[in-house]
Amino acid sequence: MNGLEQALAHPPMVTAGLLGFAARRLAPGDIRASAGQCAAYLRYTRRGDPPADAVIAMARRLPGGHGSRMIETAIEHGIDAVPDPPPELVAFFDSLAVPYWVDTDQLELASRVTARTGAAGFTALTMALLGGYLASRVAKTLVASGELEHMAPRRLAETAAWFAQVTDLGGLQPDAPGYKATLRVRLLHAKVRAGLAATPGWDFDAWHHPVNQAQMSGTTMLFGWSLLNGSCGLGLKFTRRERAAVYHQWRYIGYLLGVDTAVLPVDENDAWKLWSIQAQLEFTNPDQDSQRLAHALIQAIGPVLIGDGRDPLSRAGRIAVTEFLSACARLALGQHYADFLGLSDRKTAQGIVIAAVAATAALEYPRRLLPGATRCAETLGRHTRSALTHRMATTQHQRRAASIDGEISCPSPASTSKRNRTCP
């Protein structure tokens, strides 16, 4: 920070709950932003992703889905597999050239570190999604998609699957599922951006450009930042080298997602500073849309992980999972934000979380001392993560099948007036 610029006071989020503890104990020095830094950040709230936006515009001009087929061929097999590709598609793939700063050793270490987090990493990811809904302008984009109750389980399952793919060993190689999924996410962002920008009701002055550079940068940062700090809050320990590797991996993921390098965090210091700026500018006025998104996600957690079974064991499982993750989020966000989002306040669940944290922290000592223990933890965490994502994919498939069956069996024409609506 320029020595002539005075740092702004910490916004409320930086002092709330375990977030405040993390800012005091884990942050590398003074993370307060200056007015000049906030102004520089705001310039990127008006910018999209030109290469991806051009591809979507090109696809819309071409008839009969030809553009979409070319895009999919290029993602699956490379741009050379597309005969006479349009210049927009060529420019998009040119923007994906591996930058000089990518370190494959750090990417591999980051994948192993992320695998080790296992269920703790999934919990941290869920807390990040809940906390992210407090950013009201981001919430506007998500609410605009409609059908919150239907979309929340799908969004949770797809986000978890993508997260697992991009952080898997080799997941960012051009032929890997994680790499291809990231390109699809980037183009989906561009499609949403184009659609919302053309919507008459979109308030550019209040909500900024939809899916803008500042939001994409902050969202990308939150994945790595929340993984590390959320997992630390749940009892795991990371070395400085391990933390640096995770931030490096998410720097590259952000690059592939089309985040401008001017607002793409380079390291842990940058990530904390960006989090402070986001807390200052994006998390100040959560509204009813934030509450609606949080409620939909909370209601989705149990069914996505446990399923919709009506037997007593399934019902108990849904309640237990929902209460545990809600307790984690309440402890992290603090009472004010947790109450605002409607998170339950059961002291028993919070006590269980605290006990689990203590047990995890105790196990970290032998893990760090015993030869081979870290690799064992990585293997266990990887299997746990695989089981979680497989379970979520399975329950989502079952829910979609049930929804289709419900539509077919509905006798009233009005019952099919909305996509994926089922019989009451």
Image (cartoon, rainbow, N blue to C red):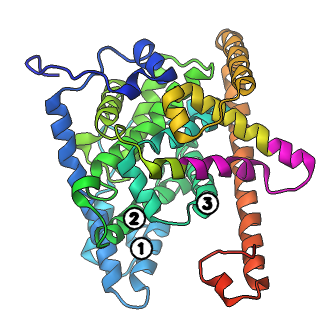
Neighbor class of circle 2 (other Cα within 10 Å; few <14, some 14-19, many 20+) is many
Q: Position of residue 389 (x, y in %)?
A: 68, 49
Relative placement, left or right, of 391 versus 240 is: right
Secondary structure found at label 2 = helix
- The vertical placement of 118 against 149, above or below, is above
Q: Position of residue 304 (x, y in %)?
A: 71, 52
Q: Quadrant of residue 416?
A: bottom right
Towards the viewer: 94 or 337: 337
Q: Quadrant of the C terminus?
A: bottom right
Q: Is residue 353 magenta?
A: no
Secondary structure found at label 1 = helix
Tell me the magenta residue range: 294-317
- The vertical placement of 111 against 7, above or below, is below
Q: Quadrant of residue 343?
A: top right
Chief secondary structure of the magenta portion: helix
Asked whether residue 372 appears in the rendered view, the answer is no
The span from disc 2 to disc 3 (Cα, nearest Å) is: 24 Å
- For disc 1, the marked residue is 71
Three-letter amino acid code at disc 3? Glu
- For disc 2, the marked residue is 187
Which of discs 1 and 3 lies nearer the camera? The answer is: 3
- For disc 3, the marked residue is 149
Q: Residue at x 28, y 78 (%)?
A: 86
Do the residues bearing badges 2 and 1 touch, measured as CB atoms within 8 Å? yes
Towards the viewer: 405 or 161: 405
Q: Residue at x 44, y 19 (%)?
A: 20
